[in-house]
Image: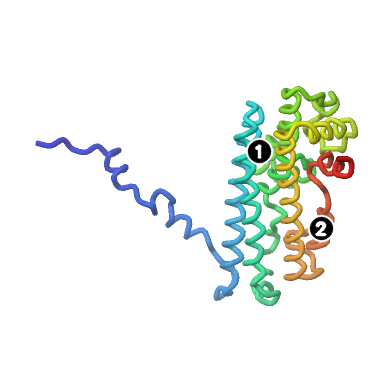
Amino acid sequence: MSPTPSPDADARAALTYGRYLRIDELLSLQQPLSAGPEHDELLFIVIHQVYELWFKELLHEMDRAVHLLSIDESHRVQHTFKRILTVLKVLVAQLDILETMTPLEFLSFRERLDQASGFQSDQFRQLEFMLGLKSEAAMHRFPEGTRARTALEARFAAPSLWDAFLQYLWREGYGVPPGDLGRDVRSPIAPSPALQAVLIELYRHDSKNAELCERLVDLDEGVQEWRYRHMKMVQRTIGTRSGTGGSAGAAYLGHTLNQPVFPDLWAIRAQL
């Protein structure tokens, strides 16, 4: 008599593509609110849900980059930056899909969004915090005790990617100024002329770490590109109207442009 398979063995044997990825649950998450529903609301929902999934992946990869810098794995962190930059390009490309929706098509369901707004994406705020763009006001928009607020509080108190990079440079033997090395990680990154002098010497004599600096510049530029394209998409779709959720729409997004994440890496361009 053959032994009876255990429940665990049955579960493993029954694993399928759909069960592993929870496809049924995933496909049930797109719930349009408009009557009919309006044709383009499904596109709007899918695009933004996919954005949130990519934001989750970016946070995962940035945590990895911080870890690799902390153990001085500069070669492996280059690979991680390559993946991050590739995902950023996908984020920009998704706006091309969203722009196939005309202003009238968006207005057909926009009022159903009520106070919901991309302005309320805690994962995007987490990405900003990881890059050093920290704001207590942004954190306090989320109710205490929620998953979003807890995650933002942790990101707010933690060193940013830039802080991890400066610690790495110090361990590489560079004279990172104490004021930059021991700065309050909850504060925005401010330009540092003393640090810029260190970075200029690095660029001139250390090709390995200069390449790492360039990947940070690529990341900074990629974020700025996404902000610009996002703003233009909003202008194209709703013009000068206010955004949902009480934001100023394209006017607010315009204020976020031309704000480098890593100002020192841009400031040294004219001195190299």
Left or right of residue 3, residue 66 in this image: right
Corner quadrant of residue 150: top right
Residue shown at 86% from the left, 37% from the top = 190
Q: Nearer the viewer, residue 45 or 71?
A: 71
Q: Which residue is labeled 2 in the image?
A: 252
Left or right of 9 in this view: 37: right
From where the camera sits, is residue 239 visible? yes
Under mark 1, the amino acid is: Thr
Can you say which quadrant of the picture contains the N terminus?
top left
Q: CA distance from mark 2 to mark 1?
A: 26 Å
Which amino acid, by three-letter code, is at mark 2?
A: Tyr
Residue 11 lies, in percent from the top left, at 31, 43
- Name the residue located 57 percent from the left edge and 62 percent from the top edge: 46
Can residue 160 be seen here? The reply is: no
Location of the C terminus (image quadrant): top right
Determine which residue is flagged by label 1: 150
How many numbered circles are shown?
Answer: 2
Residue at 83% over, 61% down:
251
